[in-house]
Image (cartoon, rainbow, N blue to C red):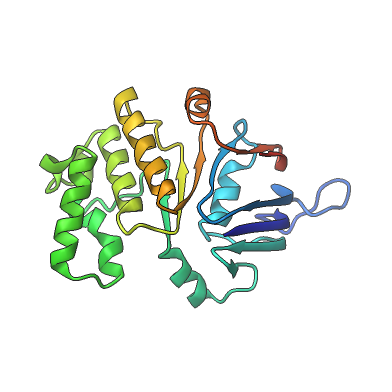
């Protein structure tokens, strides 16, 4: 499913004082099997966001080999990466909803990109919005929603087309305890059905309640995989 081998990432062509490339991630090696669940942990500045950018195909590695959903992203064409992104559901920390589209149309967007029939889209989106408790807000625009409501829309959009891989960056940060629990149950159910899930979080309570292997980063290096 996912395999990183000695992956490094640099956002510049600069070098460090010792002459090495200025890498924000260095020598990252791990695997996540199909249907695996992983926490992504580490203090602020450890490199979690940079690793998520690699996994979401926003950037390519500066060195090493990175395979996501069986596709070597360090070698893949832009067209191949665009197709691969459709198999990945992403919950961004800043939501990234389209403000001019309704809640319904934001959640429907991945299905429309896949060319699903409109009747199926209406049924699937309505069911998902009921599940996340936003059935009454499907005509609302994102700027009129609270932070927690926007987070739930982002989550619904990420999972609506049953992606092969879900990546979530602090997905419970804007949710109350009941909604956070509901989200975790959704991710666990998706994982049980075969979706691979990686969740970045600072919330140790979640990690303690839902035991799973963890990828731990410190200063751009992987210090724990298990």
* Residue drawn at (44%, 72%) of the image: 83
* Residue drawn at (84%, 53%) of the image: 20
In the image, residue 223 sits, relative to residue 158, either above or below, namely above
| Quarter of the view holding residue 117 | bottom left
| Quarter of the view holding residue 135 | top left
- Left or right of residue 29, residue 84 in this image: left
Expressed as whole percent of the image width and height from the top left, the position of residue 46 reads 65, 37
Q: Name the foreground residue: 210 vs 166.
A: 210
- Left or right of residue 149, residue 155 in this image: right
Expressed as whole percent of the image width and height from the top left, the position of residue 94 reads 39, 42
Q: Name the foreground residue: 163 vs 193.
A: 193
* Residue drawn at (42%, 47%) of the image: 192
Expressed as whole percent of the image width and height from the top left, the position of residue 35 reads 50, 52
- Left or right of residue 169, residue 44 in this image: right
Expressed as whole percent of the image width and height from the top left, the position of residue 195 reads 44, 53
The answer to whether residue 134 shows anywhere in this view is: yes
In the image, residue 200 sits, relative to residue 54, either above or below, namely above
Q: How many marks?
A: 0
In the image, residue 174 sits, relative to residue 124, either above or below, namely above
The answer to whether residue 102 shows anywhere in this view is: no
| Quarter of the view holding residue 107 | bottom left
Q: Name the foreground residue: 169 vs 29.
A: 29
């Amino acid at each position: 499913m996912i395999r990183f081998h000695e992956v490094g990432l640099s956002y510049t062509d600069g070098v460090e004082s010792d002459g090495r490339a200025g890498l924000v991630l260095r020598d990252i090696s791990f695997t996540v099997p199909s249907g695996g669940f992983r926490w992504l942990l580490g203090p602020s500045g450890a490199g979690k966001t940079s690793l998520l950018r690699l996994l979401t195909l926003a950037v390519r590695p500066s060195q090493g080999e990175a395979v996501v959903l069986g596709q070597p992203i360090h070698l893949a064409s832009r067209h191949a990466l665009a197709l691969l992104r459709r198999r990945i559901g992403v919950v961004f920390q800043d939501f990234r909803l389209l403000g001019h589209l309704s809640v319904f149309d934001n959640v429907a967007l991945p299905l429309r990109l896949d060319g699903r029939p409109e009747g199926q889209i209406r049924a699937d989106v309505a069911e998902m919005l009921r599940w996340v408790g936003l059935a009454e807000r499907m005509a609302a625009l994102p700027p009129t929603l609270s932070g927690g409501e926007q987070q739930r829309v982002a989550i619904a959009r990420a999972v609506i087309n049953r992606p092969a891989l879900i990546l979530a960056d602090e997905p419970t940060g804007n949710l109350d305890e009941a909604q956070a629990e509901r989200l975790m149950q959704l991710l666990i159910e998706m994982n049980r059905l075969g979706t691979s899930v990686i969740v970045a979080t600072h919330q140790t309570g979640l990690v303690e309640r839902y035991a799973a292997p963890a990828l731990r980063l410190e200063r751009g290096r992987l210090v724990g995989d298990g």
